[in-house]
Amino acid sequence: MGNFSLDPGQRARRAEVRDLARRHLAPLAEKGEPGRVNRPLVAELGRLGLLDRLFTSGALDLCLMRESLAQVSTEAETALALQGLGAHPVHAHGTEVQRTRWLPEVRAGRAVAAFALSEPGAGSDAAALALQATEEAPREGPGAVSISGSAAGRDRPRRDPHPTARRKWLLNGEKTWISNAPEADFYTVFARTGDPGTRAGGVTAFLVPADRPGLTGTPLDMLSPHPIGTLAFDDVPVTTDDVLGEPGAGFRVAMNTLNLFRPSVGAFAVGMAQAALDATLAHTARREAFGGPLKDLQTVAHQVADMALRVESARLMVYAAASAYDEGADGVPRRAAMAKLLATETAQHVVDTAVQLHGARALRRGHLLEHLYREVRAPRIYEGASEVQRAIIARELYKEETR
Ligand SMILES: Cc1cc2nc3c(=O)[nH]c(=O)nc-3n(C[C@H](O)[C@H](O)[C@H](O)COP(=O)(O)OP(=O)(O)OC[C@H]3O[C@@H](n4cnc5c(N)ncnc54)[C@H](O)[C@@H]3O)c2cc1C
């Protein structure tokens, strides 16, 4: 497909996801308890085959799903996205044992995944993370996995015919703002295996099942109810078998995941903005004031035109960034950052304008726009705040300039 238009099949799939969301997902989302993982909703996403698509199709399809779900049910959208964010590192960097154990469960919506990077002292500056993985003295054992000396560029540990030391670590520290915590069934956890000061180079990704001894968590109450919490690690044992990728290469696991997901955060924002635009068109076409519908006031009509213009530009930027990822084109980090930045900032503006054009009713508890007004705020902060996206864009531009 070209970068700038969807083919009929893609348009049909977008409509199909919206239809599934209306008929099957929104009713389950409404029955969920705010701020808790909605397991029936996750299971339904699995039954409908949408979770499967997280792992079988590319970045553009992920965007189409997220945009379509967001137009109908932000809860369903978020539940889908979090399964992808938490499980993508297992899909892309896991061993066969890890993949076989967890991915079928994630795809079926029976296991809930989470991505645990942020800490109280490491948010935007993720390389400052301090969750400590302290290595125990190595022991020899049969069937051990060699993780050192594998071929350059390979992400996966391989079974070594000559067993070497099986490494063991104890995790100590804290994670915070972790979506799906503390209810997830497993966590992709980024911990420091290198010396303090090693920053990104001293980080290892571990797959930590929720039932590991020493792992506890506490829910957090947010502006827009969302399953999210803190995690406390008190001598949580992990071994070579739990490593995702290779020791010391965990930051790459995190950044690869974010490069894939960033445009799709933009798609989530575009879906919310489209829902706000649709509601505004319907409202301003009917609401009477000063002897006619609001749409006959030129300032209103022009604001609506401006909303549509911005939503469409953001959508195109998101699709282009996702297509670039799928095609392995140049400039993926820059384009992903641009798409996330433009779409999330646009959605904030569009939802705010929609509230303005609806008047008081938009602020009534339970109104679609009251919900979107709260929901649209967080994506400008998570997976890299807008300022961080600008820093990435500038860094990439100057890299190209000075090459
Ligand atoms: C709803 C929600 C869900 C989340 N889910 C997860 C999750 O599942 N897993 C996870 O690991 N984390 C998650 N997070 C955490 C999120 O990734 C962090 O909040 C984010 O990285 C920002 O970190 P911080 O909040 O500590 O802000 P800080 O890093 O303290 O930054 C505060 C502000 O400082 C400014 N700033 C920071 N850096 C720069 C810079 N370089 N240049 C200019 N200005 C700057 C920005 O305005 C920024 O918003 C979630 C957050 C929210 C709100």
Image (cartoon, rainbow, N blue to C red):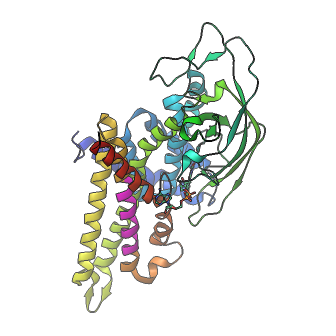
The x and y percentages for residue 40 are: 59, 48
Quadrant assignment for the C terminus: top left
352 drawn magenta: yes
Please state if 142 lies on the left or on the right of 369 as rendered: right
Please indicate, yes or no, whether residue 101 appears anywhere in the rendered image: yes
Please indicate, yes or no, whether residue 49 appears anywhere in the rendered image: no
Q: Is 45 situated above or below 252?
A: below
Secondary structure, magenta segment, majority class: helix
Comparing 250 with 200, the one in front is 200
The x and y percentages for residue 196 are: 65, 40
Residue shown at the point (76%, 27%) measured from the top left: 136
Quadrant assignment for the N terminus: top left
The x and y percentages for residue 169 are: 72, 30
Comparing 82 with 381, the one in front is 381
Q: Is 138 situated above or below 205?
A: above
Q: Which residues are magenta?
A: 340-354
Residue shown at the point (27%, 41%) measured from the top left: 9
